[in-house]
Amino acid sequence: MTRIRTNRWQRAAGALAALALVAGACGGDDDAADAPADEPAEAPAEEPAEDPAEEPAEAPAEEPAEEPADEVEVTQDGGILAAVQARGVLNCGVSGAAVAFSYTDADGSMNGIDADYCRAVAAAVLGDADAVEFTSLTAAERFTAVQTGAVDVLMRNSTWTQSRDTEVGMDFGPTTYYDGQQLMARASDDFTGQSSVEEIDGAIVCTNAGTTTETNISELAAELGISITLNTFDDYDQVTDAFIAGTCDVITTDGSGLVGRKAVQEPEDQSWVIFPATPISKEPLGPVYAQNDSQWADVVNWTVYATLIADENGVTSADVDDALAGEFGAEMVRLLGGEGEKQTFMGLSADAFYNVISQVGNYQEIWDANLTPVGLDRTGSANALWTDGGLMYPPPAR
Amino acid sequence: MTDTTIDTAPPEAPLPSPVRWVRDNLFSSVSNTVQTVAFTAVLLGLLRWVLGLVFADESNWVSVATNMRLLFTYNYPAEQFVRIWFAAGVLFVAVGASFAAWNINPSITLRRIGVSLMGTGGITLVVALITPSATPSGLRTAMWVLGVALVVIAAVVLRVIPEPHRRRVPFLGLLIGVSAIVCAIMWFVPFGDYGFSEGEPTAADGIVASSTRVPWTVLFIIMIATYVAGRGLAQVVSLAPLRRAMIAWWVIGPAFIVFMVLRDPEFDWAHIWSTDLPMAAGFALGGGALIYLLAAPGRSDLARVLGAIVAAAAVFNWVAAFFGWYPMLQKARFSFALAAIAILLVPNFAGERSARLRVAAVWAGFMVVFHWLLTGINTASTLDITAPPFLGGFVLTVSIAYYVMLASFPLGVLLSLARTSKLPIFRVLSTTYIEVVRGVPLITVLFFFSIMLPLFLPSGMGISDLAAVFAGYTVFSAAYMAENIRGGLQSVRRGQYEAADALGLTTVQRTSLIVLPQALRVSIPNLVGQAIATFKETSLIAIVGGFDLLRIANSTIPNQPDFLGQKRPALLFISLVYFVVAYTMSRASRNLENRLQAGQAR
């Protein structure tokens, strides 16, 4: 009897040791304090018999290949630019579910103005607009992804605000799209494109819950002394459905969103109008990257500027070669890598922006491909070039 | 026939006349009549409401038809689709072979078929009658024709053919019939051909694209051929090895498909020959030999000492990894940890030569598969995917569900055994684990694993989002699995344990040969219920970053410029997909219960 009991306790001890081992394997930090002291000498001595291949000497070279590809990257001395060039692929954070900005098409490709700017940066850094891996990020995880280096650059229709720029570890690049909150109502309710916000007095206003749009409209209503009923929904499809059904008089969100909805979802028997002409909030959207890496910031910023300068000079992807030959002036020659180019100072190849314009296009081309189809008109908006009365004002390339 | 099939279906009574049936079952009393009328009205109202959603003007079904590719494989590159079809082909072969190996041969009476046809035809007619006016007239006409045709066929089967309740259609006939119907629908019904090219949806009238219908037809033919071949094979060879092979395949095969076929690792052969292969061979053969030697009777103390030393070394490896002291391949660390566990457990498997050889062989096989999979997973993929990971849509839903079930089953069995163990330390640990995990919402566990876990890992070790989600799910699912199995364990009577002890069986033998088979059989309904729940709960991956069916239907499709706001059709469609899979699982479990309880009346 005693023998049996000992046996059982021995077994229990063995199994317990196994469990302790599992625990040790899972949470290395707990054992850190006491375990290593007596082991180091005996570990290498014990193993060779069992495993001929395990040799510390040869391991260092193999280690990087061993790690999973999507591991969080630590920014090294070379900065993000060197990391991207070494990797050969740009990790770009996008929304993946924002019409006209970044969305997944039925063939699995990522499209939209944000996706195109990811391609532009890849073309500038790597010479290949397709050398991008897109990561779809939710609103909650987007900034963490930038801070941890999971993405090299974030192109996710994120508004540039003081708090985001200063509080968390990231910087904002030049604005690629000036958005602003607007309202949409039915023409049959006597609204026109020239209506003012005061005219919505007494209306039922709908928007999605927990966003700045909700705060903006209620603050404005209080300021103007008008009374509105604010109904909020979880997502914008529900808001639009309620508007179509007539349970909302006015809906409000960023102008780009309203235009897209109007272009695609306006029923034939309704006529929707978007007002006021001047948006009630400022929403500058642009690239976001980790802070304190000026070289990488320069690369991203000047990629955006390059598309705007090419637009200023009327150079499209079709006539980059003519522009490089000098037909569009000396600035374009410099920008496209001809005589006097400045790209090599930034750590890029001389033809970096040639690749951007030829593979992705200038700002107007990117606009036409992504924003025109959903009914967004560039003429007369803040997104027009400064020469046309807009806010797009790239610094000179010289 | 090497196996005997026991026909347990009770003899079916002849069918009463429809009028008689209706009077007996629906209008037999006043209260019965009232209930029939009231519930019919409610059902028709509900059906009408669903049909209203399906056929409403705002529901643009082109959005679903165009996005079939996204919904099923997400952004898997089109030029590599042959891999998906190959994987599907392997699965179909495995299904056919498994049916043959387990001699699953459920014949079905003509009467059952007739009643099903009658029901389907009746429902089709009702749907045709109450569809909203928005329904295209061609579709409505088609529904009328189909409904009438089904009812007529059913009437012929039930009334004209003599004794339909005695005539049985063999399983092969059923398989061929269903496959033929599915293929015929694909080849003849003008669904239209919806595609996407050059950034624009394309639509053409006619039948579905040949790139869809041809592979599916081939798949069905392959499945039927495998079944026939398997049945033939079963006549000449014994079924036991075939079954063992199929079990091994169902455990390893899906991993092979996902990581080797679908992911297509770009193996660095020089590195494999110089490092990976010797290492795997060393662990497999060295460890196997060690286990064989230590399993000899009388060497249990040596095994424990050696196990403790290896365990200490393995722990040191991990500590060293945490501080980055000396580099070592991650899989070597894992292998050491596993070797330590195996050596510590060896005394429990002590026995004769053949038993020891078997244990050693299991270890060697496990190591080979383990190293092969880890190497494949850690090698870059050749796939050209713009937005990783390579799994998405239905493929992701099914893969995660399958692996969670596969991995949480052994874990659940161990936990339940530990919880019913006599040793207090096991009981307390297992109970704590189960209660903690069951007390926490699944989404919290998933957030913990996808956001917190990477922070706790030693430096130089990363974990992909999907792996983290999979780990979280498994941890969660195992706790529930353990409780389901514990219910089964408690149904095994005391006498079974005593009888096993009286025969002189060891604890391992008693548990694996006597207790668990009985406990698991009792647990089947609960386990399948949990499998169904796991399958549906995979939709929570959408919240932690995966692109499963739900996320694609809920946020990807409604944000395409062509289908802005088109959420409803996609959500209705994925509801149908979830329902079909879950219902199939539930039917399969019912068949399994019937089979296992055959000749087992207590």
Image (cartoon, rainbow, N blue to C red):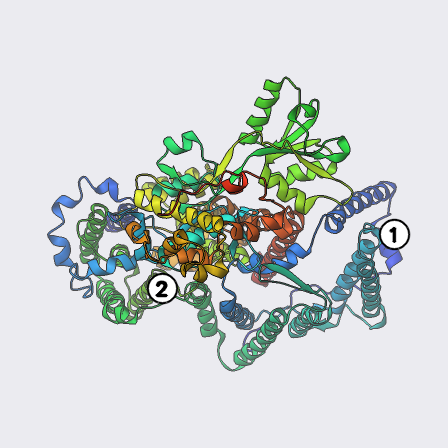
A285 or B401: which is nearer to us?
A: A285
Q: Is residue B218 above or below residue B516?
A: below
The residue labelled by disc 1 is B23
Mark 1 lies on a secondary structure that is helix
Mark 2 lies on a secondary structure that is helix
How far apart are labels 1 and 2 at the CA level? 65 Å
Residue A241 shows in this picture = yes
Location of residue B194 in the rendering, given as x and y in whole percent from the top left corner: 65, 63
Q: Point out the residue furthest to the left here.
A: A41
- Few, some or many residues within 10 Å of mark 1 (<14, 14–19, 20+): few
Q: Nearer the viewer, mark 1 or mark 2?
A: 2
Residue B488 shows in this picture = no
Q: Is residue B79 above or below residue B564?
A: below
Location of residue B410 in the rendering, given as x and y in whole percent from the top left corner: 41, 54
- Few, some or many residues within 10 Å of mark 2 (<14, 14–19, 20+): some
Same chain for the residues under marks 1 and 2 in the image: yes
Residue at 69 percent across and 40 percent down: it is: A241
Identify the amino acid type marked 2: Gly
Pinpoint the chain carrying mark 1. B
A342 or B239: which is nearer to us?
A: A342
Residue at 24 percent across and 61 percent down: it is: A62
Q: Earlier in the sequence, mark 1 or mark 2?
A: 1
B541 or B311: which is nearer to us?
A: B541
Identify the amino acid type marked 1: Arg
The residue labelled by disc 2 is B376
Q: In this image, A355 relative to B46: left or right?
A: left
A250 or A396: which is nearer to us?
A: A396
Location of residue B252 in the rendering, given as x and y in whole percent from the top left corner: 42, 65
- The reply to whether dot 1 and dot 2 touch (C-beta < 8 Å) is no
Q: Is residue A123 above or below residue B565?
A: below
Q: Point out the residue furthest to the bottom here.
A: B236
